[in-house]
Image (tube, rainbow, N blue to C red):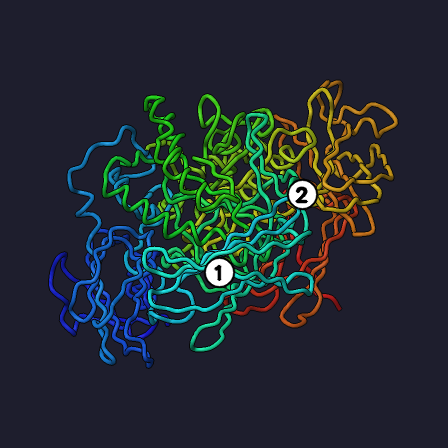
Amino acid sequence: MRLTSAWALAPGEPGGPVPDEAAWRPLEAPMPVAAALAAAGTWSLDGPARDFDRECWWYRCRFDRPAGAASDWTLGLDGLATIASVWLNGEPLLESRSMFRSHALAVGERLRAQGNELLIRFDPLADALAQRKPRPRWRSPMLAQQQLRFWRTTLLGRTPGWSPPAVVVGPWREVWLRPAGDARPASVELQPRLVDGRGELTVRCRFDAGVAVEELQLALEHRGRTHEVSLQAAVVDGSPQWHGTLCVDEVEPWWPHTHGQPARHRAQLRGRAAGGDWSMDLGAVGFRRVEADTGDTGLGLKVNGEPVFARGVCWVPLDTLKLHAEPAQYREVLTRLRDAGVNLVRVGGTMAYEADVFFELCDELGLMVWQELMFANMDYPADDAGFAAEVDAELASQLPAWAARACVVVVCGNSEVEQQAAMWGASREYWQPPLFHERIAAAVAEQLPGVVYWPSSAHGGAFPFQPHAGSTSYYGVGAYRRPLADARASGLRFATECLAFAQVPPDSTLARLRALNGDVAVRTHSPLWKARAPRDLGAGWDFDDVRDHYVKHLFGEDPMALRMSDPARHLVLGRAAAAEAVTAAFSQWRSAGSACRGAMVWFLRDLWAGAGWGYLDDQCQPKAVFHALARVCQPLHLGLTDDGLNGFTLHAVNEQDQARDGTLSVALYREGEWPVAQGERALQLPARSSQGWAITDWLDGFTDLSWAYRFGPPPADVVVARWQGPQGVVERVHFIDVEGLPLQRRDIGLSAEAGPVVEGVIEVTVRSRAAARFVHFEVDGWQPDDEGFHLAPGGERRLRFTPVVGAPRRPWRATVSAINALVPVTVRQAG
């Protein structure tokens, strides 16, 4: 049973006595200190910063033992952050020094029938960090405190350049109680594999000492038939263990959703003991085979023998203060990612291990997971015996939980350790520490033989931060302010993170900032705004500056002047610039012949309200850049690339497992309205294929579409590609930007009409006579299901608007605009 009630919290002194009764405040459930204080309304991320690493806190839980005949019980503590001492009924139980390991403690006769008291004291990590220890061989510029390398704790809240000052202190995972001697197993480890089309499910069960099991079977449901196998018994370290493997021929495999169905099959244990028969549901398992393709010096993933272009997001905990969320919120966000065409989620080493519900939903939805161990950037003291023991315990806690998950395709040793060592001057011999290349690699190979092990998120080549080999953190387009063409010119193979900007949040988020701090909070020059703009410590720029660079580069408008004269347009163009960068980069990476095999954007959601790196805001509402990512990540994809003197190339990608028949057309327009040329072909897109065609080959005569030869003015400024088949229409509208020519604003005939409110939804139809660029809305209290899209000349889009969660209900009033339109237009009410 979970211990979720009768908890209390109190401040204390390091090493001091239990606080007086008057100091305790009740808690709804065990949770970290910052989350508890925020829930009580006594502290907020929007208030003054507070360093919880310098404070001591006590937790107390009072409970009665569940009724039952068991003489022994196990107390489970699944996550204590970070320096914790535990007592039960006044007797010391545990000293814990890692938030990333779980503890199962036999409490025996210490547990009373009634009136039990569990006490946990969390001492200040700052005191431990102040102790003198050996210096690292290189520094991590993202961290103010380098000695964090000795402690197994999350870096969230401890990276002042990009995470809010709210470190996690306290119980962050479940606390539970289980009777020992139960006839059912104390632990079950599943390992499904796909071998030559055959599904193999291996199971290992451990029972408490003294439990007598007469017979045990593993059963699996597949296509309406039950497959069974009897397990074999053994005694290991005094405890009975059972193991066996069930095989199913021609099993229906698990696929990432972009390439097939994430098929899963129910598994069950059936046991016979002296007390009678019992069964235990093991959930649904998927069978798949995953391989790393490194043949071209890069990294690529193959699933069930098929190359998969892996694209997605770097995950961020859905609750900054708790590090976990309710199942419904996980489902909402992961379903949004699935619908956006994302097929890979990276849980990075700067974050925290995720809850079981996260992996269950990724299995169900067909989302692959790149899972890192929680190591990042630092020179870890693997030769320290105490540290090494904590690492071994952490691996024993975490690795078995991933073995049954079809979604877990890569386990990575760390985030950017190799890159940091190489970039900041460490000798080459230190770039690949044995901790990740030997110790952890061996543990993963033994316990997770069905996954790819990759030693570091940036790994391979002469230098791990160079994009043309292995994997890397790619910031050519982004922090390093390279032109958009660098996405392909760099020869990028696999980006474990990329395309980070200070992403301007939706208007609803800006409204919340205004409510908290006044209008100054949404002025991009103000200290309040800048405090939440992500940055690298020590750099003379931040990611606001990076975004503004692309505003000027793409649209020819001076962001400094806009901030002063038209701050609203400054924000809109900032949203548009990030969307354009994402669209251009992924169009190049997914093009026919591209060397790139995967890219994950940095990162999922803002950690607090502001212009953070998140593609979703702090409440998981999509920003305009998320909609751009969704448009360019779909399994059926059209892309356009500017190939200089060779003109534009049209690319079509069909990742699905069936060929698609239809018509592909391309049309060129001048001033976004006047037809210049067009071409059309009936063709087939083979299953899991990528094709490319020079647009000039589709036209009757030569058109200098990319304005490479420059004889006269640019012949066209808009290209519209359209695929039409039985499954529907896919359209790509591309505006051709010419360096040195500013964005032209004109009357484009933009209009919109809103229908009545039906079941809390308003449907809006948008039309435009000429091509409309980055269509967006101003509407108080409502949000569209898409925004920042382009409309073709004479085009039309239907959108659904729903109320913003938590915002006050307001009458419907809206305007629609585009960044190439002269003025916003009022959305008319139908009838």
Query: Between residues 752 and 46, which one lies in front from this camera angle?
Result: 46
Position of residue 249 in the picture relative to residue 809 (left or right): right
3D distance between C-alphas at marks 2 and 1: 40 Å
Q: Quadrant of the N terminus?
A: bottom left
Q: Tell me which label, 2 or 1, sits earlier in the chain.
A: 1
| Nearer the camera: disc 2 or disc 1 | 1
Q: Residue sitting at 26 percent across and 37 percent down?
A: 146
Give x and y (percent) for residue 575.
Answer: 55, 44
The kind of residue on which mark 1 rests is: Val
Give x and y (percent) for residue 805.
Answer: 52, 65
Q: Quadrant of residue 542?
A: top left
- Mark number for residue 589? none
Indicate the secondary structure of the residue bearing disc 2: strand
Q: Which residue is mark 2?
A: 773
Camera sees residue 251: yes
Question: How many other residues sit within 10 Å of disc 1, few (<14), some (14-19) or many (≥20)?
Answer: some
Give x and y (percent) for residue 563.
Answer: 48, 41
Q: Quadrant of residue 218?
A: bottom right
Looking at the picture, does residue 756 appear above or below residue 770?
below
The kind of residue on which mark 2 rests is: Arg
Q: Residue sitting at 48 percent across and 27 percent down?
A: 460
Query: Between residues 192 and 150, which one lies in front from this camera angle?
Result: 192
Give x and y (percent) for residue 752.
Answer: 71, 57
Question: How many other residues sit within 10 Å of disc 2, few (<14), some (14-19) or many (≥20)?
Answer: many
Looking at the picture, does residue 491 appear above or below residue 36?
above
Query: Between residues 13 and 361, which one lies in front from this camera angle?
Result: 361
Q: Which residue is mark 1?
A: 357
